Image: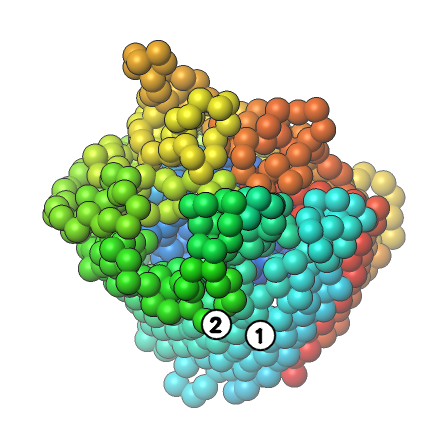
Amino acid sequence: MMRSSTLLMLAAALVAEDTTLTIGVTRLEAAAVDQPFTIYQVSGDTYQREAGAKAVDALAVTPAVFVQRTAGNQASPFLRGLTGEQTLLLFDGVRMNHAMNRSGPNQYSALLPPNSIERIDVVLGTSGVTQGSDGLTGAVDFRLAPAGRGVTAVASPWISGRGDYADGYRTSGGLDGLLKGGIAYTLEGGYTATHDRRGGKDAGDHLFFDAAGDRDIPNSGYRQSDGAARFAFTELPGQRLELSLGRTRQFDAPRADGYSENSGRTINTGAATRPSDISREFDEQTFNYLHGRHVIGNAAEIARLQTTVWYHDWYEEEIREDLQAGNNNASTADDRYRRRENQNRIQTRGVDLQVGKSFGSHQATLGGTWYRDVTTTDFQRYRTAAGVLTPGTETLSTTADQSAAVNATVPDGAVYDSQAVFLQDQWLITSDWELVGGVRLTRVHWDFEATKSRYLAAPTGTAFTESDRFSKAVSAPTGELRLGWHPLVHTTIYGGVSQGFRAPNLTNLAGLTTRASANTTSIPNADLKPEKSLTYEIGGKWQDGRDHASIALFVTTISDLIQTQYQDTNGDGSITAADTATVGNAEKGQLAGIEIGHDLGLPIHLPVGQRLAVIQAASAVTGEAEQPTVVNGRKAVEEVHISRANRIWGSFGLRYEPSPAWYLLAQVRWSAAYDEVNPGDATDVRHTTFAAKGGDAGAMPGYAVSDLKAGWKSAGGGIRVDAAVENLGDVSYRDPGSGIDGTGLNAILATTLRY
């Protein structure tokens, strides 16, 4: 059969031979449709149509993925029921995951500016062989636009803007070009400013106190600035040198679910009830990166040699404020205003090497990866005098538990590193059959010093300063075997089995985290075992020009699944701040599901150049875990639902293109009710403030919202205009785990101009 070559990097080919991997996650140089993996891509015009204020927003209509939005500035993709530290995020083929990733949804992918991203690759199953730790159900790779974007002029300036009635605006601009000597370059920057989100017609029903009845969701806006530069030297025969660097900074970024207006939290004081005014915000968050890559292709002895080095610097300043009730609820004389500040920095240095070589019908890839994470953390606690609740009058606390060693998010100066080697072989058995197999050996080591108070509940006003050093290494072999059959051109039917693993990170091992939505402190565990996954999947995919369709079914079992395990300590039937939550290894977990996607032109007679297509992405996932518990003083095993892993959701639409320049899209985004809940969901204010009527505690209702979109681009692509009216029914809705509602009736206008 005919084998396709790279389809997605034609712009780079204008300035040099394309030497970039087609799918960096799989490390195979073939179009996505020809690889025996479950792959979904958002690229080209699709990315331009779907991308919102954040690059990760473009994944909202991708099979098997839903995007949880903790706050206006935070978003985290769920892949087949898992998110955060249990899914692997890549940035231009370089791992974004680090040792301080939180145990649930995180904000890191939302720090990638959309103007720097050319496409997004989603590879499902596991990534244990090709990428190593963390990808238990898959990986997402946010691919940078190539330096110069294929421009052949010395300088090509561009500017773009996006206005969003319900949220705010984003503007960006830059300069692309090709200099003498074959140096392609891109310089770009952007600024985002959002206001409090305007929700649907019933948004005020989920707000409290002075905000009750209002459609504007308090504390949901944020600001962001970003800048980037990319360079590529292309005139060395068969080689390409790339350098990418950038910085993103978010500030004035509150977590909406932490405020009493959004959560309804109160405290009892002075024989009265009042808002607790608990809040949490990030001011600021920054991401600095530097990537260097050297690719040699088509050399005499090797088909490809690629070396990538990277440096990532993540910094966040997390601020928590609250009104603290004193010990005597009959009086306000000992109430206080309190503020806690955590400064967290983690720096990663890494290198990845891979060598490709052809042996007859075999294409072998050998490689290795090394990276090291180092933390820098601090903590300060401030509070007012007893009986004073006025912010601005607080002073640095002198209580015994003020120490940063006791209260920093993770221990300061912790080191977490990994080394790995891998081998993958693609065997073209015949023109129609192929077998892809691989093995990897990964070693992860951590070293930190932690006080006992991280693992024990310290009495009020007392700090356990005695500390121990924790130094340990774990190793994990992983393997993969996939069979692909290509009965027709651009058709692949495949099946496979793959292993993945995730070593516990510093947040699991020694992190002090409070689930702000439930106000329950999670106790870390220094004795955790690595998680290991085993995925079986079968699927089929087909593409003919712009028409494509796919289906995949999977079962993933996870042993030693790391989960927050809640214990109803006081026996009142609910999980609150009075109870305990401990990070532990469950006995096992299992995820299973199906995903369907297609973009199919209808077989009706239309004038030449016109197209009417039916598009769909539909997914169903179920997830259960067996975790240890204690019943009547005896150890037992309890089966629980994996939080937010039991869902059915998708989108359906019609897209009409009267000419290559225009498109019109009508779509419905929908979700069935979330009613198979985890114990921790029961008091999660992100769930309880948008509860399903008559459902279990933590259950959330389903929804269906409709959108209209339209767009036009000039023949040369120098002008582009996209417009949308979202949520025509002005429906109030919220995805599980999200801290704010989706937008209500919303108008969007986005433009790009290039000279």
Point out which mark residue 191 bears. Answer: 1
Badge 2 amino acid: Gly
In this rendering, would 744 be left or right of 462? right
Badge 1 amino acid: Tyr
Vertical order, 173 against 588 (above or below): below
Cα–Cα span, label 2 and label 1: 30 Å
Nearer the viewer's eye, disc 2 or disc 1?
Answer: 2
In this rendering, would 234 be left or right of 262? left
Residue 658, given in percent of the width and then of the height, sits at 84, 57
Nearest the eye: 9 or 663: 663
In this rendering, would 632 be left or right of 119? left
Nearest the eye: 159 or 39: 159
Mark 2 residue element: loop
Q: Residue at x 87, y 44 (%)?
A: 605
Where does label 2 land, which residue?
392
Nearest the eye: 566 or 228: 566
Point out which mark residue 638 bears. Answer: none
Residue 480, given in percent of the width and then of the height, sits at 33, 32
Q: Residue at x 57, y 70 (%)?
A: 223
Residue 150, given in percent of the width and then of the height, sits at 53, 73
Color style of the picture: rainbow
Q: Residue at x 66, y 43 (%)?
A: 734
Residue 196, given in percent of the width and then of the height, sits at 67, 62
Regarding residue 137, the answer to whether it shows in the image is no
Vertical order, 741 against 236 (above or below): above
Q: Quadrant of the C terminus?
A: bottom right
Task: Report crowding for label 1: few under 14, some 14 to 19, many 20 or more residues within 10 A (C-alpha).
Answer: many
